Amino acid sequence: MVPNPVNSGDLDIKIIGAVPFMHLLQEGTPTFQLQVTPALPEEYLRAGTTTPGIKTEEQILSEVVPPEYHEFADVFSKGSAKELPPHCSYDHKINLKE
């Protein structure tokens, strides 16, 4: 029977890489994994608010983008990021190889 480390009172917590983790699994050692990922800026801003509802993209950008760049806020918007600028006479051609 494998001992239950949660009830034993002696937890051995370590940060290890993938290879040592695989060795422990192969040995049959009870192992647990915790994955921590950073929150998206939108989620971070919503978590810090006390007002109900979701912030608009403009409100989020005004808090994330430094004040000296607010006049360029349209560059940071999701809508602008999805479209290419219009073609101009000084565009350069890129020849692709097939």
Image: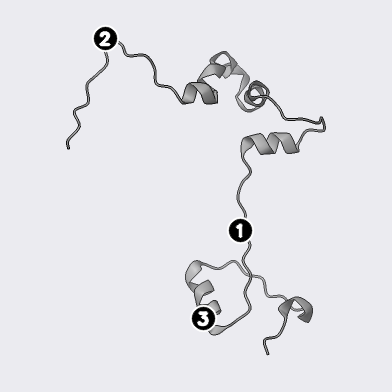
Q: Is 15 in front, or is 95? A: 95
Say if 32 sits above or below 23 in the image: above
For the C terminus, give its image quadrant.
Answer: top left
Q: Check disc 1 and report the residue beneath it.
A: 35
Under tag 2, what secondary structure?
Answer: loop
Q: Check disc 3 and report the residue beneath it.
A: 26
Residue 42 position within the rendered picture, expressed as x and y whole percent measured from the top left: 65, 34
Disc 1 + disc 3, Cβ < 8 Å: no
In the image, farthest residue toward the top: 89
Q: Check disc 2 and report the residue beneath it.
A: 89
The image quadrant that residue 9 belongs to is bottom right
In the image, farthest residue toward the bottom: 1
Q: Earlier in the sequence, mark 1 or mark 3?
A: 3
Amino acid on which the number 2 mark rests in the picture: Ser
Amino acid on which the number 3 mark rests in the picture: Gln
Residue 67 position within the rendered picture, expressed as x and y whole percent measured from the top left: 62, 19
Amino acid on which the number 1 mark rests in the picture: Gln
Say if 33 sits above or below 74 in the image: below
